[in-house]
Amino acid sequence: MINESIRHYTDGRVPDAGIACLFSVENRFQARLDVEAALALAEAEVGLIPEPAGDAIARHAQVEKLDLARVAAGTASASHPLMPLIEEFARVVGSEHGGWVHWGATTQNITQTADVLVLRDAHRALKDLIARVLRGMSKQAEASAAVPMAGRTHSQHAVPVTFGFKVAVWIDELTAHTDRLERLEDRLFRVLMGGAVGTFASFGPAGREVERRVANHLDLGTMPVPSRAINDGIVELVLTLAQIAGTAGKIGKDIYSMMQPEFGEAFEPIPEGTVGSSTMPHKRNPQLALDLLSMSAQLRALAAPALESMQHDHEANGGMTDLLEETVARATVLAGDILTRLDVIVDGLELDEQRMRANLALSEGLIGSESLMMELGERIGRQQAHEVVYEVAQESAVGDTPFLDLLVRNATVSAYFDRDEIRRLIDPRAYLGESITIAHEMAQHARAVADRLEFSARVAKPVPLSVREPSPEPVAAPDRVLVGL
């Protein structure tokens, strides 16, 4: 179970993602009861258990009816992840029908399918958060589509871009991850209902039909081979969340550096009263950007144990199952924490356009060297033009003479361009390429993806279990509950 006490001092600055609560003991137990209820209804429908038993089990599948202290004590003494819950549930159902609880199923059939139900709710919450982030990015990309700034590669001035282009990069990655999240749904949202090793032996000839009916009750899919050793869909979710974390970490790193006084180009919103340092009153620390960096590292590190969890030996290994259960819970909660912070940052991001322009002018035209080289290359060839401009640029970089003055003095350059033409060619504002167009295009794309996510959230509603009226026919219950590990 996820440890809900592991929280962050910045939590008060962001809304609750609504995901950590999904992994509470009570919610996960309720999901297990939902699976047990679906199993009982399915088995009653095909005649594996008496109809009144299926009704009674489904009707009592409410975590509020259980004595959770009894379950906790039983778990400690029995050292089993599910048996104490089953025994308590059977007690609540009653002696007449309680013996039919968990009929033919193995522990992982219930726990993994229940976790898939929890992950489905978390998945919807994550997509809702992504939609909000994309709307904020769309707004920023539109507003800053034409705001010039220094493009940087290897942390050095490269060629000019606009801030809107920088946001367009963020949008492109995040929408690609959104596509990955949507594409994995069929491989993730499936019941695991094949019995001890996935052969349906305990269900007899009705096994596939029981599986199908359980899936229908829970609005999930089925597995071609319901083996307990197959967990690639859940692993894929962790890997996709790790990619989202990678993008968020990159954005956090950009904001972190741009907030440095030496840059001073962009700032995460800092509410009044936020304390940056216990000893330095002037500090305006990039707290949420730092959160993105640290949480991104934590989530990305979970990709390795997720992949390791695929190393089941033979038909099942409980250690690998436990490893993935904890890993996916931690990854999902972290993803929610990351996206809430990213939403706050993007929505309230403050730009200093004047400082961007000042930084753009720091090299006194050197950032426009490519523009000049390309124009000169049309006259003398690209390679020779590169050599000419390179020599002038390096002389300016290590000396005190402005780039423009050295270009004017250079015989090759001055043979084709006068001073005004050279000044125009190295003006960074005139060499933005398709930055503005790309920013507007990706802003529109972000809105379209957000619209799609919000529409799917509106139409996707949990399907409640169809609990029928209890049958009047009393049926004798078996004398024990069958539980496999």
Image (tube, rainbow, N blue to C red):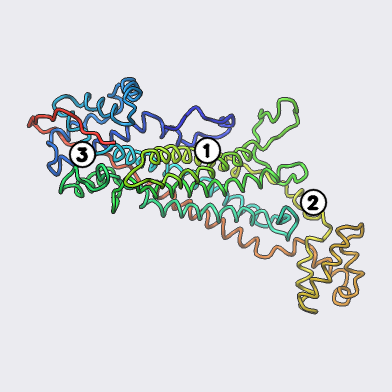
Question: Is the residue under label 1 in contact with that under label 2 (CB below 8 Å)?
Answer: no
**Relative image position of residue 2 (x, y in whole percent):** 44, 32
Which residue position holds label 2?
358
**Discs 3/1, front:** 3
Q: Earlier in the sequence, mark 3 or mark 2?
A: 3
Q: Nearer the viewer, residue 323 or 461?
A: 323
Three-letter residue code for mark 3: Gly
Q: Given the current orientation, which residue lies at the most extreme left position? A: 473
**Relative image position of residue 38 (x, y in whole percent):** 24, 39
Query: What is the CA distance from the residue labelled 3 to the residue labelled 1?
Result: 39 Å
Q: Does dot 2 land on a helix, a strand or a loop?
A: helix
Which residue is at a point 25% across and 31% down the rendered structure image?
61
**Relative image position of residue 302 (x, y in whole percent):** 50, 42
Counting other residues with Cα less than 10 Å from the Cα at mark 2, is it few (<14), some (14-19), or many (20 or more)?
some
Which residue is at a point 46% across and 45% down the rendered structure image?
306
Which residue position holds label 3?
104
Question: Is the residue under label 1 in contact with that under label 3 (CB below 8 Å)?
Answer: no
Q: Does dot 3 land on a helix, a strand or a loop?
A: loop
Which residue position holds label 1?
337
Total number of numbered discs in the rendering: 3
Q: Nearer the viewer, residue 355 or 471?
A: 471
Question: Is the residue under label 2 in contact with that under label 3 (CB below 8 Å)?
Answer: no
Instruction: Give the position of the N terminus as an image quadrant.
Output: top left
Q: Does dot 1 land on a helix, a strand or a loop?
A: helix
Q: Quadrant of residue 202?
A: top left
Three-letter residue code for mark 2: Ala
Q: Earlier in the sequence, mark 3 or mark 1?
A: 3
Three-letter residue code for mark 1: Asp
Q: Earlier in the sequence, mark 2 or mark 1?
A: 1
Query: What is the CA distance from the residue labelled 2 to the residue labelled 1?
Result: 35 Å
